[in-house]
Image (spheres, rainbow, N blue to C red):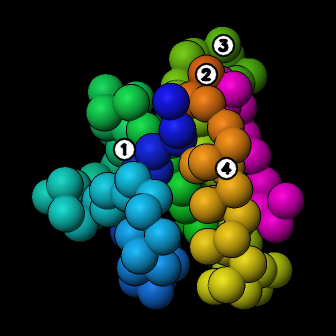
Amino acid sequence: MSVAFYMDEHVPKPITVGLLIRGVDVLTVQNDKRRGVDDAILIDRAGELGRVMFSFDADMLREATRRQQVGESFSGVIFAHPTQISVGECIQDLQIIAEAGVPEDLRNQILYLPL
């Protein structure tokens, strides 16, 4: 089973489009009608959908870190700082994770890009 992503609203559209072109299973917060929703709710939503959250938002990273510290389960968060990775590198790294990973590997984990 490949990894499916739930893209935070801060993720640039070219990243999502690039992944979709490559056949990666991606759902955006916008397409899920969740724009402006609290990060904790978005992480829960990703888990409900069996997806891993991807974000450029430091607040999302803080929420995932909090969950790790208190032992609160989540489906996983992948974080990238927008000034430390190009669009192309981001697409490439996420495609690798989608194709080579399994959702269970990311459960309760925070993964940082670039790989």
Classify 79 as above or below 65: below
Q: Residues within 10 Å of mark 4 (few under 14, many from 20)?
A: many
Q: Is residue 63 visible?
A: no
Residue closer to the observer: 72 or 22: 22
At label 4, the amino acid type is Ile
Tell us which disc is closer to us: 2 or 1: 2
Q: Give the residue pinned by disc 2.
A: 104
Asked whether residue 53 is drawn in magenta, I would say no
At label 3, the amino acid type is Gly
Q: Dot 1: what SS?
A: helix
Q: State how far apart marks 1 and 4 are (Cα).
A: 20 Å
Q: Position of residue 105 (x, y in %)?
A: 69, 26
Screen quadrant of the C terminus: bottom right
Classify 19 as above or below 102: below
Image-quadrant location for residue 32:
bottom left
Left or right, residue 115 beside residue 35: right
Give the number of marks.
4
At label 2, the amino acid type is Glu
Residue at (45, 58) in percent of width and height? 24
